[in-house]
Image (cartoon, rainbow, N blue to C red):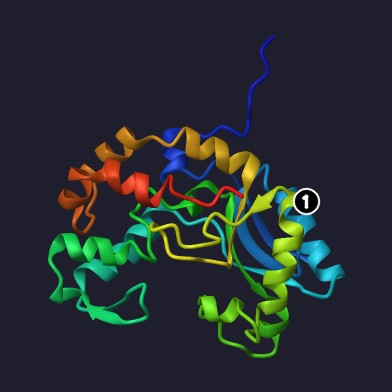
Amino acid sequence: MKSIDNSMMTPEQLIGLEQNHLINVVDNSELLGQKFECHHEVLIPIAKLIRQSELDGVPLRVISSYRSFERQAEIWNYKYNNDVELNLRDGTTVNSFELSPKERVDAILHYSAIPGTSRHHWGTDFDVFDAAAIDQGYEVKLTEEEFEDKGPCSRLDEWLDYNLESFGFFKPYREDKGGVACEPWHISYRPIAEKALKEFPLDFLKETLREKDIGGKDNINSRLESLARKYVYNICTE
């Protein structure tokens, strides 16, 4: 009898419309009292990673884990539909309403994924920070500077680079490859995330976006394949 691969996800799960592949962690003492959701097969690996970080004196805290399609749409629509400042790669900002629809989509994509394309939908990816800094009252911003020398997460960044692979994790945005900007705080569980990326349902996403209230969706769908190549598949694999 052929075995069933319980790590595989449905198209609905892959774009954040369904959550039945997740497990909910609530105030688990072994995880520094943290609360988050993740893919059911990622709980043990992330728990081991967190536990080792605590033993090594660089306690890791999950800032963001699973994110639904609806939540990603809220983030996206806020930036697209309101006259807000958008951060650009060169460190400058621009008002969203000063941009054409295409320019606005491109500007948002530096730091926010199109709904349905976020790796956080899979329950395999986590934004992390040094718990010691947070416990001392530091306000998390999730910027590259926080992970550089003398930043509050410089020790954690070094620890992650040394330990992630041993626990099955990697940094998909370790460096700027011209798609998503560098995110040293973003870690991903390789065994499940690689399968998710390979099975990513681009055609299903295009159909879903047509039915949803997403800012700039006509511009997005008209070039979804090229945007996916740049922002979904274009990651650091090592």
Q: Is residue 3 visible?
A: yes
Q: Quadrant of the N terminus?
A: top right
Q: Position of residue 139 (x, y in %)?
A: 56, 86
Q: In this figure, which residue is indicated by the disc labeled 1?
A: 166
The residue under the point 38% across, 52% down is 231
Q: Is residue 67 above or below residue 89?
A: above
At which x and y percent is residue 92? 32, 82
Left or right relative to 70: residue 152: right
Residue 141 appears at what percent x and percent y? 51, 80
Q: Is residue 30 visible?
A: no
Q: Residue furthest top?
A: 1
- Label 1 element class: helix
Establish if 99 lies above or below 216. Answer: below
Residue under the image location 41 percent in, 48 percent down:
232
- The residue located at (68%, 76%) in the rendering is 130
| Image location of residue 220, percent across then percent down | 22, 50
Compared with 90, 65 (above or below) is above
Quarter where residue 132 is shown: bottom right
Query: Badge 1: how crowded within 10 Å, few (<14), some, or many (20+)?
Result: few
Viewer-nearest residue: 144 or 113: 144
